[in-house]
């Protein structure tokens, strides 16, 4: 790796590290200051902080019970290692900075959620609904679950439409309706934005 590429590459590693730190700081704050299900309205009728924990993949889906969780956590670790290697070799090859920027975001998001899934179960006490005792750090291995069995902390909630179904909708008329009901975190945002930039810059470099 030439000196110029090495110096440029440091910027992308630092970017990933800073985003991981922001992700973890926000998760630790929410984990230790919110009850499960607790909401704080930030922008009325739109942006709120809503603490939930995701035991599986997207939208809280779970597969295969405890063994499935082990497989998922190991896959996330291997995926993160793959992204690290990809970024390293792309920096070494002098890849387009847009691709490197996007990869840094994806890497930060992947590692951010890996930390939750691998370690949180071992270092935090359980979070509960309406529990007078908030979750807190505990000695390693004495947390709410074992290594690789942690739950991902989610809290950003931006329902784009918060209304009710019209009366003419069969079986749902008059019931609450929310569009974009997902609750996510900084790491999820990094992955989503990173993938968008990656596809954009990949197409741009292919056209040049």
Image: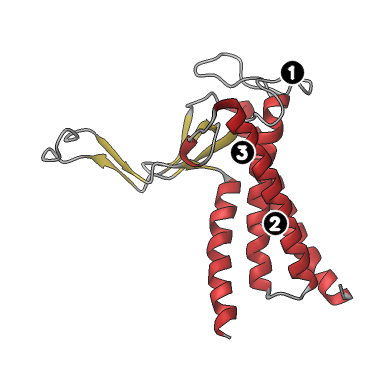
Q: Nearer the viewer, residue 202 or 193?
A: 202
- Label 2 to label 3: alpha-carbon separation: 16 Å
Residue closest to the far top: 132
Q: Is residue 205 left or right of residue 178?
A: right
- Contact (CB < 8 A) between labels 2 and 3? no
Q: Nearer the viewer, mark 3 or mark 1?
A: 3
Check the picture and name the quadrant holding the N terminus: bottom right
Badge number at residue 72? 3
First-in-chain label (2 vs 1): 2
Badge number at residue 142? 1
Callout 1: 10 Å neighbours few (<14), some, many (20+)?
some
26 up-or-down from 7: above or below: above
Q: What residue is drawn where x is 76% and y is 76%?
A: 94
Q: What residue is drawn where x is 66% and y is 22%?
A: 145
- Contact (CB < 8 A) between labels 2 and 1? no
Q: Position of residue 3 (x, y in %)?
A: 89, 74
Q: Nearer the viewer, residue 5 or 93?
A: 93
- Label 2 to label 1: alpha-carbon separation: 31 Å
Q: Which residue is mark 2?
A: 83
Q: Position of residue 115 (x, y in %)?
A: 70, 39
Check the picture and name the quadrant holding the C terminus: bottom right
Q: Nearer the viewer, mark 2 or mark 1?
A: 2
Q: What residue is drawn where x is 67% and y is 54%?
A: 107
113 up-or-down from 193: above or below: above
101 up-or-down from 54: above or below: below
Question: How was the colour assigned to the protein in this rendering?
Answer: secondary structure
């Amino acid at each position: 790796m030439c000196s110029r590429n090495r110096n440029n590459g440091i910027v992308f590693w630092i970017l990933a590290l800073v985003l991981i730190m922001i992700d973890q700081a926000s998760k630790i704050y929410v984990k230790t200051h919110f009850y499960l299900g607790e909401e704080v309205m930030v922008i009325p009728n739109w942006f709120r902080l809503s603490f939930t924990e995701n035991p599986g993949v997207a939208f809280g889906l779970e597969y295969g019970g405890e063994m499935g969780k082990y497989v998922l956590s190991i896959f996330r670790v291997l995926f993160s290692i793959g992204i690290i290697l990809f970024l390293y070799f792309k920096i070494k090859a002098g890849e387009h900075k847009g691709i490197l920027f996007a990869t840094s975001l994806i890497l930060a998001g992947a590692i951010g959620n890996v930390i939750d899934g691998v370690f949180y179960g071992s270092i935090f006490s359980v979070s509960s609904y309406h529990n007078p005792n908030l979750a807190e750090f505990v000695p390693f291995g004495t947390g709410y679950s074992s290594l690789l069995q942690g739950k991902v902390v989610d809290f950003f909630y931006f329902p784009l439409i918060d209304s009710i179904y019209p009366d003419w909708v069969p079986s749902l008329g008059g019931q609450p309706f929310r569009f974009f009901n997902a609750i996510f975190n900084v790491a999820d945002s990094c992955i989503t934005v990173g993938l968008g930039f990656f596809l954009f810059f990949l197409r741009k470099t292919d056209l040049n």
